[in-house]
């Protein structure tokens, strides 16, 4: 069975380089991704809130866009809880049997019966639930929006029994366990932090970028840390500028209001100059802007909230 390994090395400048490998049954290691530089937790406030909530025996649902830092945040939370001496189980969506087997292995729950037969998924779920009733452990599940219905129902039962859970999802459906958990929505990272991430990624690739180049590339990243690192790699490879993938846009409401006020003032000017054509022209444009604003706000919008 393939297992995962993660090694951290500290460089001379104090930063940490993280290497991830898949280790096969023959002992051969295969790199899973390029090394990444990790210097700090950019969501330290959210980390403290989550750790405090879990210690208070509460469960949480973390919602954020893809690449927004949910996985990294969950790793920092797990590390903090382990440093405090707690047992932490981390799992990602797969089949129900694979998930409960992975949880059982991390908890030390026997996955076989007394006769040596492998327990079914339902039997393992019951065995894990019984274990958690007598032992404190925190269950963290990333990409929870991909969980099968059977697993979600089981997690809902664990939640009702008082088991602290941390689920992280991009677009969780508006039902079962996702409706019951208190929710924290991750906001986009600040421009300062995004620029810092981009500088670190450029340093790792030995890529020199001017302040103007960073500012231009930052527009493609928005407040998304994964996109911030990706656009630096694209710049390093000399790829053409693609359309932005992030979902943070400038609010055009102030511009619409300013246009509406301008055309209203134009009407008053036409009235003062006794110009019927100017008065009518300003009125028609003001009405057109008002109608456009109503149509714009009636359009459906994408959201990171439940089920949307």
Image: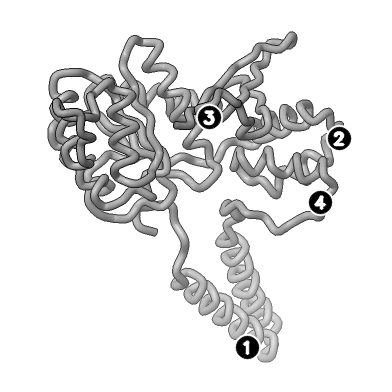
Residue linked to disc 3: 24
Query: Looking at the image, is mark 1 or mark 2 earlier in the sequence?
Result: 2
Q: CA distance from mark 3 to mark 1?
A: 78 Å
Image coords of residue 243 (percent x, y): 70, 59
Q: Is residue 11 shown above or below 251?
A: above
Residue 239, label in figure = 4
Residue linked to disc 1: 280
- Is residue 162 at all visible to an observer of this figure? no
Q: CA distance from mark 1 to mark 4?
A: 51 Å
Secondary structure state at the residue bearing disc 4:
loop
Query: Looking at the image, is mark 2 or mark 4 earlier in the sequence?
Result: 2
Q: CA distance from mark 1 to mark 2?
A: 51 Å
Query: Looking at the image, is mark 1 or mark 4 earlier in the sequence?
Result: 4
Q: Are marks 3 and 2 in contact (CB under 8 Å)?
A: no
Secondary structure state at the residue bearing disc 1:
helix
Q: Are marks 3 and 4 in contact (CB under 8 Å)?
A: no
């Amino acid at each position: 069975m393939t297992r995962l390994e993660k090694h951290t090395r500290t460089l001379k400048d104090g930063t940490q380089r993280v290497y991830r490998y898949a280790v096969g049954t023959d002992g051969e290691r295969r790199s899973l991704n390029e090394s990444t530089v990790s210097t700090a937790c950019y969501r330290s406030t959210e980390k403290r809130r989550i750790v405090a909530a879990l210690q208070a025996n509460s469960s949480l649902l973390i919602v954020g866009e893809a690449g927004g830092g949910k996985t990294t945040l969950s790793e920092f939370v797990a590390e903090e809880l382990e440093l405090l001496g707690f047992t932490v189980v981390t799992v990602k969506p797969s089949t129900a049997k694979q998930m409960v087997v992975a949880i059982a292995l991390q908890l030390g729950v026997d996955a076989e019966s007394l006769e040596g037969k492998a327990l079914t998924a339902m039997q393992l779920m019951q065995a894990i639930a019984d274990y958690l009733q007598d032992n404190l452990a925190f269950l963290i599940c990333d990409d929870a929006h991909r969980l099968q219905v059977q697993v979600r129902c089981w997690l809902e039962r664990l939640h009702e029994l008082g088991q602290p859970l941390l689920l992280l999802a991009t677009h969780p459906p508006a039902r079962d366990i996702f409706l019951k958990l208190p929710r924290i929505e991750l906001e986009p990272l600040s421009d300062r932090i995004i620029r810092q991430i981009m500088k670190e990624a450029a340093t790792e690739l030995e890529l020199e970028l001017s302040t103007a180049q960073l500012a231009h590339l930052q527009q493609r990243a928005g407040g998304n840390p994964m996109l911030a690192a990706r656009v630096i790699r694209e710049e390093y490879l000399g790829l053409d500028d693609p359309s932005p993938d992030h979902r943070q846009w400038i609010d055009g409401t102030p511009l619409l209001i300013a246009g509406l006020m301008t055309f209203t003032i134009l009407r008053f000017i036409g009235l003062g100059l006794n110009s019927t054509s100017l008065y009518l022209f300003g009125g028609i444009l003001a009405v057109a802007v008002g109608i456009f604003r109503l149509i714009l706000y009636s359009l459906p919008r994408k959201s990171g909230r439940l089920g949307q």
